[in-house]
Image (cartoon, rainbow, N blue to C red):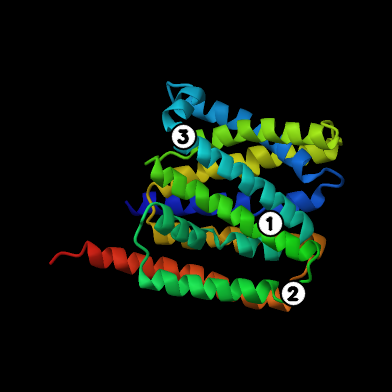
Amino acid sequence: MKSAHTRSLILVFAAGVLWSTVGLGIRLIQEADVWQILLYRSMSLTIFLYIVIRTHSSNTPFVQVRRTGLPGVIAALSLVVAYAGGIYAIQTTSVANAMLLFASAPFLAAVLGWGILRERVHGGTWIAIFFAIVGIGIMVGNQTFGGSLKGSFAALGSALGFAAFTVTLRWGKESEMLPSVFLSGIFGVVITAAICIGLGLPLAISAQDSGISIGMGIFQVGAGLVLYTLGSKALPAVELTLMSLAEVLLAPLWVWLLLGETVTSNTLAGGCVLLGAVAGNAIFSARVRSTAIAPG
């Protein structure tokens, strides 16, 4: 039992490490636009997940996608929004700023779940949401209305997309993420190709930019998701939340070590408040659940 738990922790942490390379990957892209990056990343993600799902199931991914129905479609479109916002955010603000704002997704999911699904939100979570807002305010408080502030809003939009994805899966009572992510890859290819054509952007990009984008689709998103799916089945929510912070903490580390990108004092201070709210909420939620199921 303990070995299975340790294995799950390693898998989820490995997923976080892979996800944390997104900032470095996008920083290494030279010329490609957000839509061109997402086009190539979506293509490789779709092919990768098709192979994974087909290998481990007797049904094709398209059969599984049909079973998800409307919630699966909405979840997939939410991911496309999240992916686009995430790429634009990293291109226009610091990796640390973007990644820390992405960490607000659990709180946005709590608010969406409360407002749409009428899910109960405990008082401790509302307190954590308040401190998360304070942290976000500190992070963006000194940014002028230019690229950096637009990037911060894009990061929050990306977090909202991921929040909508998780809430929609709960609405559709779907425990399996892969079919909806596979569908998001298909939507991503179609939507970004149409946008590129509409904006006059070439579908062909440089070998370096296409190689990095394809690699992110396979390893950073695809393999990371598979590892997370395998590991999450044996871990409680609090450990999943805390382990997911590895992605937020490691992403700025890679660009600092390899590219020399630094962090502003506002991002550092606000990020600490935001991460503290995330960790505190995870621990509080675990205690609430353990109290609820305690005998007597």
Along the polypeptide, which appears first: circle 3 or circle 1? 3
- Callout in the foreground (2, 1): 1
The percent coordinates of residue 88 (x first, y second) are 74, 52
Q: Residues within 10 Å of mark 1 (few under 14, many from 20)?
A: many
Residue at 36% x, 57% y: name it: 119
Seen from the viewer's position, the closer of residues 67 and 21 is: 67
Q: CA distance from mark 3 to mark 1?
A: 26 Å
Residue type at mark 1: give it: Ala
- Disc 3 target residue: 70
Seen from the viewer's position, the closer of residues 192 and 232 is: 192
The percent coordinates of residue 137 (x first, y second) are 63, 74
Q: Residues within 10 Å of mark 2 (few under 14, many from 20)?
A: few
Residue type at mark 2: give it: Thr
Along the polypeptide, which appears first: circle 2 or circle 1? 1
| Depicted 198 relative to depicted 220: above or below | above
Residue 154's label in the rendered image is 1
Q: Residues within 10 Å of mark 3 (few under 14, many from 20)?
A: few
Q: Work out which residue is located at the far front of the displayed protein and give it.
A: 115
Disc 2, SS: loop
| Depicted 64 relative to depicted 212: above or below | above
